[in-house]
Image: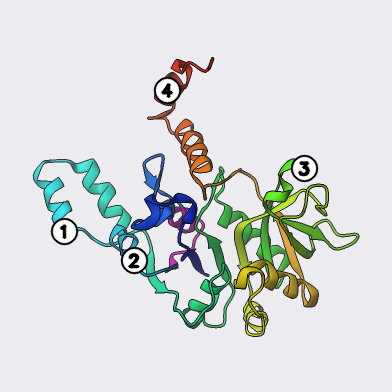
Amino acid sequence: MKAVVTIAGFGTRFLPASKAVPKEMFPIAGIPLIQHHVEDLVESGITDIAIVVRDGAEVVERHFSPAPELEAHLAARGKKALLKDVRRVSALANIMFVRQGDDLPYGNASPVLAAREWLEDDPFYYQFGDDFVLSDTPVPRQMLDKYAEYDPAAMVAAQEVAEEETSLYGILELKKGSLRQIARIVEKPAPGAAPSNLAQIGHFVFSPEIFDVLDTLAPGKQGELWLADAVDRLSARSTVIAHTIDGLWLAAGDPLRQLKANVEACLRRDDLRDWILDYLRSLDLGA
C-alpha cells in the first residue's frame, strides 16, 4: 500500500515561524514531526510515500535527501553516530514530493486529488501532517489491520474526547445500532450538540471509491474542499468504519499543543526523561 501525507497548508497558527519553514518540520523531541510520520509508516510496512507540499517546502525535500557536504563533515570529525542518523533519514523510504497545484481548491481533501495519478487504482493510506500520536503500535499498523478485517470503502481513525472538547473537532455520528459504522461527521458541533464524543483524527485508509466522491464534490465552508464532506458522502453510499486507536493523540497544529507533544515525547525517551522531569520539578509554579 502507498501512503499520502499532507503538509500543503500555510501553518497560519505558527506564523511568523512557519513563513519559511513548514510547521511539520518543527521538532518533536528533536525529530521533525514529518519524520515521525514517515518512521511510523515504514514501521507499519508502508515504504512508498508521497508528501504533498506547497511552494516553498523545499526544506522538507532536503531533509529526506542525501547531504554529501554534511556527511563528509561528520565523517572527518569522527562523529559516527550522527553520521549514521543523517544517512538513515535519507534511506528511510521511497519518498516522492507532490506540489498541490493552484488548479485545486484549498482544503484538506485536495492533496488526495494532487496525488491521484501516483496512487493508481489501489487502496491507500492518508494522513494529516499535524496529528501526532504516541503509541506502542504505530497508528498506520493499527488502521491497516482493521482495514484488512472489515474491507470497507474507508477507515477513519478516532479517539474519545471530553464532552467539553467536542466543539473543537470533527465528531463522528455512528449509524443507528452500529458500534463502528459512520453515518456522518459533524464538524466542530456547538457545545452540547455533538452526536458522540468520538473525534476524527487525521489518519484514514481509502479505497479508490473516494475519487468517485471527490470528482463531484464542490468546495464547502470557506470555499475549501473538506475531507469530512467527502467522508459524509461516501458514508451515505458505502461502508465507512471508525476505528478507535490506542495511543495518546496530540494534535500538534498550534504552539501550545506542539509544546505539549514535545513534553510527552521527551518523557518517553530514555535519554531525555530524567532531564525533562528534573526541569519540570524545578519550576516555580506558585505565580
Residue furthest to the left in view is 76
Q: Look at label 3 and name its amino acid.
A: Glu
Residue at (24, 41) in percent of width and height: 81
Question: Which residue is disc 1 drawn over?
Answer: 68
Highlighted magenta segment, given as a residue range: 37-49
Magenta span contains residue 194: no
Q: CA distance from mark 2 to mark 4?
A: 38 Å
Q: Amino acid at mark 2?
A: Gly
Q: Out of 73 and 111, give the one closest to the viewer.
A: 111
For residue 274, which numbered disc appears in the image?
4
In the image, is residue 126 above or below residue 263? Answer: below
Whichever of callouts 2 and 3 sits on the residue coming sooner in the sequence is: 2
Residue 163: numbered disc: 3
In the image shown, does 81 or 225 lie closer to the viewer? 225
Residue 158 relative to residue 107: left or right: right
Observer-side mark, 2 or 4, equals 2
Residue 25 in view (yes/no)? no
| Cβ atoms at labels 2 and 3 below 8 Å apart | no
The disc labelled 1 sits on which kind of residue? Pro
